[in-house]
Amino acid sequence: MKKVVVLLVFAVVLLVGDKSGIESSLGAKKACDSGNMLGCSNLGSRYAIGNGVEKDLGKAVELFKKACDGGNMRGCYNLGLMYEKGKGVEEDFSKAAQLYIKACDGGEVRGCYNLGLMYSFSKAAELFKKACDGGEMLSCYDLGNMYANGDGVKKDLGKAAELYKKACDGVETFYCSNLGVMYVDGKVVEKDFKKAVELYKKACDGGDMLGCTNLGFMYEKGKGVEKDFSKAVELYKKACDGGNMLGCYGLGDMYVGGDGVEKNVKKGIELYKKACDGGNMHGCFNLGLMYAFGNGVEKDFSKAAELLKKACDGGDMHGCRGLDVIYKLKVME
């Protein structure tokens, strides 16, 4: 059974430098040399990624330290990243945490966010809130996940929806998909398939492959949009190619059923396998069924049982029930 799911992951904020693209490396150096610590931090970011200068992680660390010591909290945050990732310096989580604390206390909300990632749930929630209140939309999204799951805070789907909306309405269009799921579910907000489609499209267009998968599901089932198998195939393929295993599973279904694409069971099996190998238990379940009934592959109860057990162990209840069926079929064979 295909499901629209919520992506519950934490991401790490990357190096922050001059986002405008106007300040040249030469300009940043001039600013840094004249005592402008933001210029030092921006120049460090350029050395870290090789933008306008030859990449030099050691030089980046040196500049971030200069900026941080000079009171620029962005420099402290970036230096923390270098220590956390072991870039240009030996990996040192303790040092990274100290720098994130300094950045966070100094008003650099990205420092609060990354520090939150290093803590257990309750402390993380506190730091994510501080970062979210300071305008770091990624923190709003992750805090929403914590409220959705009851991790470190009392479970509150209404609060989760509020935070997802804040993140989606901000710059993080990538994270609109979870809010869309709530409009499909209809337990916290009034059920509205058209609104869900709008949010999934926003997420998909913003690069969220889960949003593409969920939008594909809506086209496949005709929820909030006119049913369109070809569009569903297009979206599942985009998601699968982008690394979303649920999209691969959905695309496999379309090939096996010949919906919106020429029927190709072997292609469907390949996609189920890709999904299963990538951690999608629905793919394991469907692949197990193909082996159980010899559909597109040689019948193999042992292989089927192995795959259904994997699905079951991974939380797919269909896999658990399928195992019982397999054992009965084997006895009757």
Image: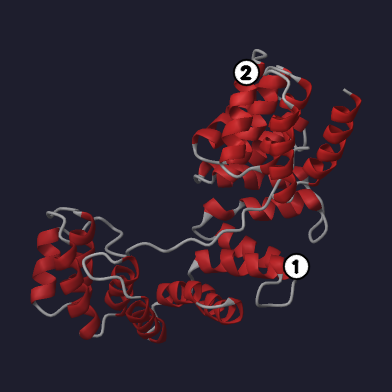
Would you place residue 75 above or below residue 327 in this image? below
How far across and down, in percent of the image, does residue 20 sit? 29, 58
Task: Tell me the kind of residue under disc 1.
Answer: Gly
Quadrant of the rendered image containing residue 78 = bottom left
17 displayed left or right of 185: left
The span from disc 2 to disc 1 (Cα, nearest Å) is 44 Å
Q: What's the residue at 63%, 31% (across, down)?
A: 272
How far across and down, in percent of the image, does residue 100 sit? 38, 79
Quadrant of the rendered image containing residue 324 = top right
Q: What's the residue at 69%, 18% (across, down)?
A: 298
Q: Which residue is mark 1?
A: 158
Q: Nearer the viewer, residue 279 or 144?
A: 279
Task: Tell me the kind of residue under disc 2.
Answer: Lys
Residue 80: which numbered mark, if any?
none
Would you place residue 190 above or below residue 295 in this image? below
**For numbered disc 1, what is the local secondary structure?**
helix
Q: Which residue is mark 2?
A: 266
The N terminus, quarter of image: top right
How far across and down, in percent of the image, does residue 14 sit? 37, 62
Asked if the residue at tag 1 contacts the one at tag 2, i.e. Cβ–Cβ closer than 8 Å, the answer is no
Which badge, 2 or 1, comes first in the chain's sequence? 1
161 displayed left or right of 174: right
30 displayed left or right of 129: left
How far across and down, in percent of the image, does residue 66 sit? 17, 79
Q: Nearer the viewer, residue 31 or 209?
A: 209
